Image: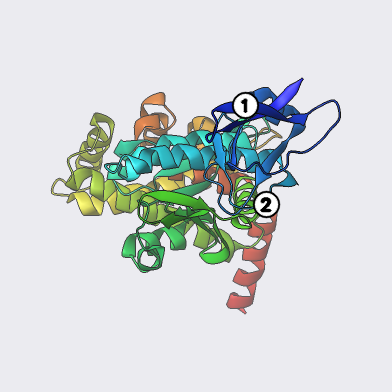
Amino acid sequence: MVDFLCFCAANDVSHPILDRQRGEWPETCSCNRVIIPNIAIISALRYTCRAKAAKYLSRDCETYFYSERMERVEMTENEMILHDYLREIEKYYKLGIAKEHSYRSTLQTMLPRLVQAVTAVNEPKRVACGAPDYAVLRLIGGNLLTIGYIEAKDIGVSLDKIEKDEQLKRYLHALDNLILTDYLEFRWYIKGEKQMTARLATLHGGKSLTLDKTGIVTTGELLCSFLQHSAESIRKPEELAKRMARLTHMIRDITIQAFEKREASDTLKGLYEAFKTVLLPDLPTTEFADMFAQTLAYGLFAARYNHKGSEAFNRSDAAKEIPRTNPFLRKLFSTIAGTDFDDEPFIGFVNELTQVLGVTDMEAVLADFGKRTRREDL
């Protein structure tokens, strides 16, 4: 069976250049043009041809052009996935009219192929209110939990300048696991500190993308590390306070933007009216956003404190954990626990706040807090 055919442009004839049964690898033909006719062959052999002048590298049936002798190279599954991702990105880029949002679905569908049980969520409404472009979730212990965020910019935009932007500074301050990308370069941050940078490809003449042969490996490692990141257990009160504060600030800022851009939902408007009725009739939306975010954080902490049993702490059960001595908070959390709240632009941060409390060792936190209080009393 012939696996590879070379179609010679000079005399318009074709001849076999690889016999699978004998395992021979093709020599360079004078026309330097090779067509792989069968995707199953690449998938089975997990090999491809590599050379400096290669125009495409993909599992799909594509034309390959070479300027140097071909060499046998084994590819990993992740490299194949990233090859395919880059090819899709290049398709949109070559149109000449593609914008940042044109590439979103390509990145969104690539991530679950790298790591199973991962879901990338991109919702324009949340992005418009100041949330990162993607929230990344992973199925852990039967629950779909937020593990990180991705902020994406258009191809060619300077990521060095974006790093200095106030919005990204807010993200780095608030989010423990974040990627900044222009779809070709990826920068990974943990708790605001840059962990790793990788470049998958570079712009070539403003018309095409050139694969970085070493960068493809580094990019795969970076993305897999990001997708497999898991939160560490919290045992100290100051650490819990800092992480809760960072997420609370994000909820506040997004709530403010929702009102300023007239994107506030009926549910959020209803909560605003309830706060005005109970607390202050002339309450500005900015102060409401601050009070709402703090009340939400306090309520979740109170619910976590009262949570007993081996089942994981979650937002939907939080209302049941609120003491009956606080009817306003119980009513608020009956709304927060409902499905209508899933559409709010800040819901990802509410869920992450719940997860942070879920991985907190409350006994250790309270014991340490008690020690500090006794020392201060002395």
Above or below 123: residue 50: below
Residue 293 pos. (x, y %): 36, 49
Q: Which residue is mark 2?
A: 361
Residue 160 pos. (x, y %): 40, 68
Mark 1: few, some, or many residues within 10 Å (few <14, many ≥20)? few
**Number of marks in the image?**
2
Which of labels 2 and 1 is toward the front?
Answer: 1
- Residue ranking furthest to the top: 1
SS for dot 2: loop
Amino acid, disc 1: Ser
Residue 351 pos. (x, y %): 49, 40
Above or below 85: residue 42: above
Q: Is residue 132 left or right of residue 5?
A: left
SS for dot 1: strand
Q: Which comes before the other along the chain, label 2 or label 1?
A: 1
Q: Which residue is mark 1?
A: 14
Task: Answer whether labels 2 and 1 touch (C-beta < 8 Å).
Answer: no
